[in-house]
Image (cartoon, coloured by chain):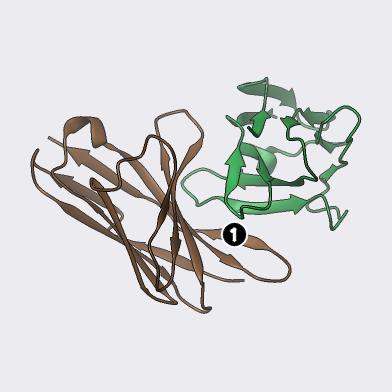
Amino acid sequence: AQRVTQPEKLLSVFKGAPVELKCNYSYSGSPELFWYVQYSRQRLQLLLRHISRESIKGFTADLNKGETSFHLKKPFAQEEDSAMYYCALNTGRRALTFGSGTRLQVQP
Amino acid sequence: GAVVSQHPSRVICKSGTSVKIECRSLDFQATTMFWYRQFPKQSLMLMATSNEGSKATYEQGVEKDKFLINHASLTLSTLTVTSAHPEDSSFYICSAETGDPYEQYFGPGTRLTVT
């Protein structure tokens, strides 16, 4: 069965520091990975997807099939990046399997 | 971007009663919608896939007779929690998918409290 693991419940960094939110997945087929973000009191929204290979708000994520990882990175964290981040996997069933989420706190 | 609404945003009901939650795609048509449940400080767990014009597909362990899903149009799916009990208290979130590129747009969620 498919599974998404986000090992860190909380990641606290200072403004300007690099950020890496870890995500590992298990799936035997060809996965489609996403990162979703949920700011305080707002709905879940798509941050980026691996197939588009784009950078959104300075965040990037590279799919590493060898390590079955899709870590989210940003070189310089901003206070407005503080939010809950979920890694999600689409296995072709079209429903998403979510990781447990990582709360990012960026301190001034 | 696409917008998904949910109504109500929060509801309190007595044990044994039924509660209906609506999920609407406001500016696009969605053949498929999804219902998730989120416990406090936990991730979203898929409950069921709602298909317009056909029966919903439930995840293992989700009682289909308790969580009734109806997807009568391309813009509306409803989740009815029947004979609610306190353990059904949770945050229920729906999403609607678009085609190409594939993406799911999420509603703001409905907080259900059963007393």
Image point 62% across, 71% down: which residue? B1
Image point 82% across, 31% down: which residue? A69
Give A105 or A38, whichever is nearer the viewer: A38
Q: Chain of mark 1?
A: B
Residue B94 versus residue B85 in the image, above or below: below
Across and down, in percent, residue B88 comes to: 25, 36
Q: Tell me the shade of chain A.
A: green
Residue A10 versus residue A49 in the image, above or below: above
- Observer able to see residue A15: yes
- Observer able to see residue A83: no
* Residue wearing tag 1: B104
Q: Tell me the shade of chain B.
A: brown
Total labels drawn:
1
Tell me the quadrant of the picture where the N terminus of chain A can be found: top right
Q: Secondary structure at mark 1?
A: strand
* Amino acid at pointer 1: Gln
As drawn, is B20 to the left or to the right of B78? left
Give A57 or A6, whichever is nearer the viewer: A6
Image point 17% across, 38% down: which residue? B114
Which of the 4 quarters of the picture holds residue A37? top right
As drawn, is B70 to the left or to the right of B4? left
Image point 53% across, 78% down: which residue? B28
